[in-house]
Protein backbone atom coordinates (compact mmCIF):
# COMPACT_ATOMS: atom_id res chain seq x y z
CA UNK A 1 0.00 0.00 0.00
CA UNK A 2 1.50 3.31 -1.10
CA UNK A 3 1.65 5.74 1.84
CA UNK A 4 2.88 8.70 -0.22
CA UNK A 5 -0.63 10.20 -0.05
CA UNK A 6 -0.02 10.98 3.63
CA UNK A 7 3.08 13.11 3.15
CA UNK A 8 2.36 16.62 4.50
CA UNK A 9 -1.31 15.82 5.14
CA UNK A 10 -2.56 17.51 8.31
CA UNK A 11 -4.02 14.71 10.44
CA UNK A 12 -5.80 14.99 13.80
CA UNK A 13 -5.73 11.68 15.68
CA UNK A 14 -7.47 11.17 19.01
CA UNK A 15 -6.31 8.38 21.29
CA UNK A 16 -2.75 8.54 19.98
CA UNK A 17 -1.18 7.44 23.28
CA UNK A 18 -3.01 4.10 23.37
CA UNK A 19 -1.87 0.81 21.89
CA UNK A 20 -3.50 1.17 18.47
CA UNK A 21 -2.93 4.93 18.49
CA UNK A 22 0.81 4.51 19.06
CA UNK A 23 1.12 2.08 16.16
CA UNK A 24 -0.91 4.38 13.90
CA UNK A 25 1.17 7.39 14.97
CA UNK A 26 4.32 5.49 14.01
CA UNK A 27 2.86 4.69 10.57
CA UNK A 28 1.78 8.29 9.96
CA UNK A 29 4.95 10.04 11.10
CA UNK A 30 7.01 7.59 9.04
CA UNK A 31 4.85 8.49 6.04
CA UNK A 32 5.55 12.21 6.56
CA UNK A 33 2.15 13.30 7.85
CA UNK A 34 1.83 16.50 9.88
CA UNK A 35 0.29 14.73 12.84
CA UNK A 36 -1.46 16.18 15.87
CA UNK A 37 -2.50 13.72 18.55
CA UNK A 38 -5.01 14.43 21.31
CA UNK A 39 -5.32 11.96 24.16
CA UNK A 40 -4.99 11.28 27.84
CA UNK A 41 -1.63 10.30 29.27
CA UNK A 42 -0.60 6.79 28.21
CA UNK A 43 -2.91 4.35 30.02
CA UNK A 44 -0.26 1.90 31.25
CA UNK A 45 3.27 1.85 32.62
CA UNK A 46 5.19 0.73 30.64
CA UNK A 47 3.42 1.91 27.51
CA UNK A 48 3.96 1.72 23.77
CA UNK A 49 3.69 5.47 23.17
CA UNK A 50 6.78 6.19 25.26
CA UNK A 51 8.66 3.28 23.69
CA UNK A 52 7.72 4.04 20.08
CA UNK A 53 9.75 7.23 19.67
CA UNK A 54 6.94 9.17 17.98
CA UNK A 55 6.41 11.99 20.48
CA UNK A 56 9.22 14.19 19.14
CA UNK A 57 7.99 13.65 15.57
CA UNK A 58 4.45 14.96 16.11
CA UNK A 59 2.41 17.51 18.04
CA UNK A 60 1.22 15.52 21.05
CA UNK A 61 -1.52 17.21 23.09
CA UNK A 62 -2.51 15.63 26.40
CA UNK A 63 -6.20 16.21 26.98
CA UNK A 64 -9.56 14.58 27.62
CA UNK A 65 -12.12 14.27 24.81
CA UNK A 66 -14.77 15.10 27.41
CA UNK A 67 -13.19 18.59 27.69
CA UNK A 68 -14.79 20.35 24.73
CA UNK A 69 -12.91 23.62 25.12
CA UNK A 70 -9.45 22.05 25.27
CA UNK A 71 -10.32 19.70 22.41
CA UNK A 72 -11.53 22.64 20.34
CA UNK A 73 -8.35 24.60 21.03
CA UNK A 74 -6.14 21.72 19.87
CA UNK A 75 -8.37 21.05 16.85
CA UNK A 76 -8.37 24.66 15.67
CA UNK A 77 -4.60 24.90 16.01
CA UNK A 78 -4.12 21.69 14.01
CA UNK A 79 -6.48 22.82 11.22
CA UNK A 80 -6.70 19.22 9.99
CA UNK A 81 -7.64 17.83 6.61
CA UNK A 82 -8.21 14.31 7.97
CA UNK A 83 -9.57 13.28 11.38
CA UNK A 84 -9.27 9.78 12.86
CA UNK A 85 -11.09 9.24 16.15
CA UNK A 86 -9.74 6.44 18.32
CA UNK A 87 -9.95 7.89 21.85
CA UNK A 88 -12.09 5.61 24.00
CA UNK A 89 -12.54 3.71 27.21
CA UNK A 90 -11.81 0.43 25.37
CA UNK A 91 -12.30 -2.38 27.89
CA UNK A 92 -15.47 -4.41 28.40
CA UNK A 93 -14.74 -5.42 31.99
CA UNK A 94 -13.73 -1.87 32.95
CA UNK A 95 -17.04 -0.61 31.55
CA UNK A 96 -18.94 -2.70 34.10
CA UNK A 97 -16.96 -1.02 36.89
CA UNK A 98 -17.15 2.54 35.48
CA UNK A 99 -20.18 2.79 33.18
CA UNK A 100 -20.65 6.57 33.56
CA UNK A 101 -17.05 7.30 32.58
CA UNK A 102 -17.37 4.83 29.69
CA UNK A 103 -20.46 6.56 28.29
CA UNK A 104 -19.04 10.04 28.86
CA UNK A 105 -15.86 9.16 26.98
CA UNK A 106 -17.28 6.99 24.21
CA UNK A 107 -20.45 8.96 23.48
CA UNK A 108 -19.83 12.57 24.50
CA UNK A 109 -16.24 12.26 23.30
CA UNK A 110 -17.41 11.68 19.75
CA UNK A 111 -20.10 14.36 20.09
CA UNK A 112 -17.43 16.86 21.13
CA UNK A 113 -15.15 15.94 18.25
CA UNK A 114 -17.97 16.12 15.69
CA UNK A 115 -18.90 19.52 17.10
CA UNK A 116 -15.33 20.70 16.51
CA UNK A 117 -15.60 19.53 12.92
CA UNK A 118 -19.06 21.08 12.48
CA UNK A 119 -18.08 24.48 13.87
CA UNK A 120 -14.37 24.77 13.11
CA UNK A 121 -13.62 22.15 10.47
CA UNK A 122 -13.65 24.10 7.21
CA UNK A 123 -10.43 22.34 6.20
CA UNK A 124 -11.68 18.82 7.02
CA UNK A 125 -12.44 16.52 4.09
CA UNK A 126 -12.27 13.03 5.63
CA UNK A 127 -13.32 11.64 9.03
CA UNK A 128 -13.00 8.07 10.34
CA UNK A 129 -14.62 7.11 13.64
CA UNK A 130 -13.21 3.82 14.93
CA UNK A 131 -15.75 1.82 16.93
CA UNK A 132 -15.73 -1.96 17.51
CA UNK A 133 -17.05 -5.30 16.31
CA UNK A 134 -19.11 -5.39 19.52
CA UNK A 135 -21.57 -2.70 18.35
CA UNK A 136 -23.94 -5.35 16.99
CA UNK A 137 -26.90 -6.94 18.74
CA UNK A 138 -25.16 -10.24 19.38
CA UNK A 139 -27.38 -13.26 18.68
CA UNK A 140 -24.49 -15.70 19.15
CA UNK A 141 -24.97 -16.97 15.61
CA UNK A 142 -22.25 -18.71 13.63
CA UNK A 143 -21.99 -16.30 10.69
CA UNK A 144 -20.48 -12.84 10.60
CA UNK A 145 -22.40 -9.65 11.24
CA UNK A 146 -22.88 -7.28 8.34
CA UNK A 147 -22.92 -3.49 8.46
CA UNK A 148 -26.71 -3.53 7.98
CA UNK A 149 -27.35 -5.63 11.11
CA UNK A 150 -28.86 -4.13 14.26
CA UNK A 151 -26.70 -2.07 16.61
CA UNK A 152 -27.29 -2.81 20.30
CA UNK A 153 -24.21 -3.76 22.29
CA UNK A 154 -24.93 -5.60 25.55
CA UNK A 155 -22.42 -4.24 28.06
CA UNK A 156 -21.70 -0.52 28.71
CA UNK A 157 -18.58 -0.51 26.51
CA UNK A 158 -20.25 -2.21 23.55
CA UNK A 159 -23.44 -0.21 23.94
CA UNK A 160 -21.57 3.09 24.20
CA UNK A 161 -19.88 2.26 20.91
CA UNK A 162 -23.27 1.48 19.36
CA UNK A 163 -24.33 4.94 20.51
CA UNK A 164 -21.19 6.40 18.94
CA UNK A 165 -22.22 4.88 15.62
CA UNK A 166 -25.70 6.44 15.88
CA UNK A 167 -24.30 9.85 16.87
CA UNK A 168 -21.92 9.79 13.90
CA UNK A 169 -24.71 8.86 11.52
CA UNK A 170 -26.85 11.70 12.83
CA UNK A 171 -24.09 14.28 12.33
CA UNK A 172 -23.39 12.85 8.89
CA UNK A 173 -27.03 13.25 7.85
CA UNK A 174 -27.76 16.53 9.62
CA UNK A 175 -24.57 18.44 8.83
CA UNK A 176 -21.82 16.75 6.84
CA UNK A 177 -23.64 15.51 3.76
CA UNK A 178 -24.40 19.11 2.81
CA UNK A 179 -20.97 20.46 3.76
CA UNK A 180 -19.14 17.80 1.78
CA UNK A 181 -17.25 16.17 4.66
CA UNK A 182 -16.82 12.43 4.10
CA UNK A 183 -17.49 10.47 7.32
CA UNK A 184 -17.10 6.72 7.90
CA UNK A 185 -17.31 4.45 10.91
CA UNK A 186 -15.13 1.35 11.09
CA UNK A 187 -15.91 -1.68 13.23
CA UNK A 188 -12.75 -3.65 13.93
CA UNK A 189 -12.24 -7.07 15.44
CA UNK A 190 -9.92 -7.92 18.34
CA UNK A 191 -6.34 -6.82 17.76
CA UNK A 192 -3.04 -8.34 18.82
CA UNK A 193 0.49 -7.03 18.45
CA UNK A 194 3.62 -5.95 20.23
CA UNK A 195 3.35 -3.29 22.91
CA UNK A 196 -0.11 -3.91 24.33
CA UNK A 197 0.28 -3.70 28.11
CA UNK A 198 -3.45 -3.54 28.94
CA UNK A 199 -5.06 -5.51 31.74
CA UNK A 200 -7.70 -8.13 31.00
CA UNK A 201 -6.61 -8.73 27.40
CA UNK A 202 -5.57 -12.21 26.47
CA UNK A 203 -2.30 -11.63 24.61
CA UNK A 204 -0.94 -9.09 27.12
CA UNK A 205 -1.86 -11.64 29.83
CA UNK A 206 0.06 -14.29 27.87
CA UNK A 207 3.10 -12.07 27.52
CA UNK A 208 3.17 -11.11 31.20
CA UNK A 209 2.93 -14.74 32.29
CA UNK A 210 5.57 -15.92 29.79
CA UNK A 211 8.05 -13.23 30.83
CA UNK A 212 7.62 -14.35 34.45
CA UNK A 213 7.87 -18.04 33.55
CA UNK A 214 4.34 -18.65 34.84
CA UNK A 215 1.39 -20.59 33.44
CA UNK A 216 -1.09 -18.44 31.52
CA UNK A 217 -4.54 -18.06 33.11
CA UNK A 218 -7.40 -18.06 30.58
CA UNK A 219 -10.90 -16.90 31.55
CA UNK A 220 -13.03 -17.95 28.58
CA UNK A 221 -11.10 -20.45 26.43
CA UNK A 222 -14.13 -21.41 24.33
CA UNK A 223 -15.19 -17.90 23.31
CA UNK A 224 -14.70 -17.11 19.60
CA UNK A 225 -13.37 -13.74 18.43
CA UNK A 226 -12.11 -12.29 15.12
CA UNK A 227 -8.43 -11.85 16.02
CA UNK A 228 -6.11 -9.85 13.76
CA UNK A 229 -2.73 -8.15 13.98
CA UNK A 230 -3.04 -4.46 14.83
CA UNK A 231 -1.64 -3.36 11.46
CA UNK A 232 -4.58 -4.94 9.61
CA UNK A 233 -7.27 -2.51 10.84
CA UNK A 234 -4.86 0.45 10.94
CA UNK A 235 -4.08 0.15 7.25
CA UNK A 236 -7.82 -0.28 6.58
CA UNK A 237 -8.51 2.99 8.42
CA UNK A 238 -5.89 4.72 6.29
CA UNK A 239 -7.29 3.23 3.10
CA UNK A 240 -10.82 4.37 3.93
CA UNK A 241 -9.67 7.85 4.97
CA UNK A 242 -7.72 8.24 1.71
CA UNK A 243 -10.45 6.87 -0.57
CA UNK A 244 -13.19 9.09 0.83
CA UNK A 245 -10.83 12.10 0.85
CA UNK A 246 -10.57 11.62 -2.91
CA UNK A 247 -14.19 10.58 -3.46
CA UNK A 248 -16.76 11.03 -0.70
CA UNK A 249 -18.98 8.32 -2.23
CA UNK A 250 -16.77 5.88 -0.33
CA UNK A 251 -17.98 7.28 3.00
CA UNK A 252 -19.98 4.59 4.82
CA UNK A 253 -19.71 2.04 7.64
CA UNK A 254 -17.25 -0.84 7.29
CA UNK A 255 -16.30 -3.99 9.15
CA UNK A 256 -12.63 -4.91 9.25
CA UNK A 257 -11.57 -8.31 10.50
CA UNK A 258 -9.83 -11.54 9.58
CA UNK A 259 -10.96 -14.29 7.27
CA UNK A 260 -12.73 -17.29 8.78
CA UNK A 261 -9.38 -18.82 9.80
CA UNK A 262 -8.77 -15.85 12.09
CA UNK A 263 -12.02 -16.39 13.99
CA UNK A 264 -10.65 -18.74 16.63
CA UNK A 265 -11.36 -19.65 20.22
CA UNK A 266 -9.33 -17.96 22.90
CA UNK A 267 -7.93 -21.38 23.79
CA UNK A 268 -6.69 -21.88 20.21
CA UNK A 269 -5.12 -18.43 20.27
CA UNK A 270 -3.27 -19.21 23.49
CA UNK A 271 -2.17 -22.58 22.09
CA UNK A 272 -0.60 -20.72 19.16
CA UNK A 273 1.12 -18.33 21.55
CA UNK A 274 2.53 -21.19 23.64
CA UNK A 275 3.84 -23.06 20.57
CA UNK A 276 5.54 -19.96 19.22
CA UNK A 277 6.97 -18.82 22.55
CA UNK A 278 8.39 -22.25 23.35
CA UNK A 279 10.09 -22.87 26.70
CA UNK A 280 7.30 -25.36 27.57
CA UNK A 281 4.89 -22.46 28.02
CA UNK A 282 1.46 -23.65 29.17
CA UNK A 283 -1.95 -22.32 30.13
CA UNK A 284 -4.80 -23.22 32.46
CA UNK A 285 -8.53 -22.62 32.39
CA UNK A 286 -9.52 -20.66 35.49
CA UNK A 287 -13.30 -20.82 34.83
CA UNK A 288 -13.70 -17.42 36.47
CA UNK A 289 -17.10 -16.01 37.24
CA UNK A 290 -17.39 -12.54 35.79
CA UNK A 291 -19.63 -10.12 33.92
CA UNK A 292 -21.30 -11.19 30.69
CA UNK A 293 -19.11 -11.30 27.61
CA UNK A 294 -20.15 -12.55 24.18
CA UNK A 295 -19.35 -16.19 23.51
CA UNK A 296 -19.38 -16.12 19.70
CA UNK A 297 -18.63 -13.08 17.55
CA UNK A 298 -17.66 -12.90 13.89
CA UNK A 299 -17.61 -10.17 11.26
CA UNK A 300 -18.54 -10.30 7.59
CA UNK A 301 -16.01 -8.06 5.81
CA UNK A 302 -17.39 -8.58 2.29
CA UNK A 303 -18.22 -4.90 1.91
CA UNK A 304 -14.68 -3.68 2.59
CA UNK A 305 -13.29 -6.37 0.30
CA UNK A 306 -15.61 -5.61 -2.60
CA UNK A 307 -15.77 -1.80 -2.35
CA UNK A 308 -12.12 -1.07 -1.52
CA UNK A 309 -10.41 -4.29 -2.61
CA UNK A 310 -9.09 -4.77 0.92
CA UNK A 311 -8.08 -8.17 2.28
CA UNK A 312 -6.29 -9.38 5.42
CA UNK A 313 -2.61 -10.08 4.84
CA UNK A 314 -1.36 -11.85 8.00
CA UNK A 315 -2.83 -14.99 9.55
CA UNK A 316 -3.55 -15.00 13.27
CA UNK A 317 -0.58 -17.36 13.80
CA UNK A 318 1.72 -14.95 11.97
CA UNK A 319 0.31 -12.09 14.02
CA UNK A 320 1.32 -14.05 17.12
CA UNK A 321 4.83 -14.48 15.67
CA UNK A 322 5.12 -10.72 15.08
CA UNK A 323 3.87 -10.03 18.62
CA UNK A 324 6.47 -12.34 20.14
CA UNK A 325 9.18 -10.91 17.87
CA UNK A 326 8.38 -7.44 19.26
CA UNK A 327 8.30 -8.80 22.81
CA UNK A 328 11.76 -10.36 22.54
CA UNK A 329 13.17 -6.99 21.45
CA UNK A 330 11.45 -5.36 24.41
CA UNK A 331 12.74 -8.07 26.77
CA UNK A 332 16.37 -7.28 25.94
CA UNK A 333 15.77 -3.51 25.92
CA UNK A 334 16.34 -3.39 22.17
CA UNK A 335 15.37 -0.82 19.54
CA UNK A 336 11.57 -0.62 19.65
CA UNK A 337 11.14 2.04 16.92
CA UNK A 338 13.28 -0.12 14.62
CA UNK A 339 11.25 -3.29 15.12
CA UNK A 340 8.00 -1.32 14.68
CA UNK A 341 9.22 0.25 11.44
CA UNK A 342 10.44 -3.14 10.21
CA UNK A 343 7.08 -4.78 10.86
CA UNK A 344 5.20 -1.86 9.29
CA UNK A 345 7.37 -2.09 6.18
CA UNK A 346 6.92 -5.86 5.99
CA UNK A 347 3.16 -5.50 6.21
CA UNK A 348 3.14 -2.68 3.65
CA UNK A 349 5.12 -4.85 1.21
CA UNK A 350 2.40 -7.50 1.40
CA UNK A 351 0.16 -5.01 -0.41
CA UNK A 352 2.80 -4.02 -2.94
CA UNK A 353 3.46 -7.66 -3.84
CA UNK A 354 -0.11 -8.13 -5.10
Image (cartoon, helix red, strand yellow):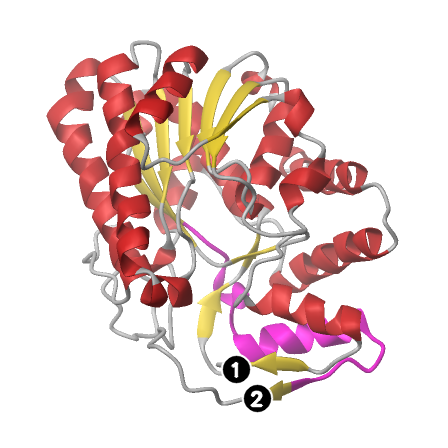
**Viewer-side residue, 352 vs 219:** 219
Residue 162 place in picture, x, y as percent: 24, 52
- Please say if 67 is above or below 200: above
> Which of disc 1 and disc 2 is earlier in sequence?
1
Q: Identify the magenta region.
A: 256-283
Element under disc 1: loop
**Viewer-side residue, 54 vs 321:** 54
Residue 213 place in picture, x, y as percent: 80, 77
The reply to whether callout 2 and callout 1 are in contact (CB within 8 Å) is yes
Residue at the image point whose x is 57% and y is 80% from the top: 218
Q: CA distance from mark 2 to mark 1?
A: 7 Å
Q: Is residue 99 left or right of residue 16?
A: left
Element under disc 2: strand
Residue 265 belongs to the span the image colors magenta: yes
- Please say if 214 is above or below 195: below
- Please say if 263 is above or below 185: below
Residue at the image point whose x is 55% and y is 64% from the top: 199
Residue 200 belongs to the span the image colors magenta: no
Q: Which residue is mark 2?
A: 285
Residue at the image point whose x is 52% and y is 82% from the top: 221
Residue 157 place in picture, x, y as percent: 32, 58
In what quadrant of the picture does the C terminus appear? top right
Q: Which residue is mark 1?
A: 221
Amino acid sequence: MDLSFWKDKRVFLTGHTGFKGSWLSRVLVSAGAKLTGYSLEPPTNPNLFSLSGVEEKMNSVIGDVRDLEKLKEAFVEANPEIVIHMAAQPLVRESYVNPVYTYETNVMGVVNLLECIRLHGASVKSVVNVTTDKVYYNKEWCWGYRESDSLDGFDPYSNSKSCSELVTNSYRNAYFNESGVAVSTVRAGNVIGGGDFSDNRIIPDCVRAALKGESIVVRNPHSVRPYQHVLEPLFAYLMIAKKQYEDRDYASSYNVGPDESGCVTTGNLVDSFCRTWGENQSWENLNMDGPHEAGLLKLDCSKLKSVLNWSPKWTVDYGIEKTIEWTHVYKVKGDIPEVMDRQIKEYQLMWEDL
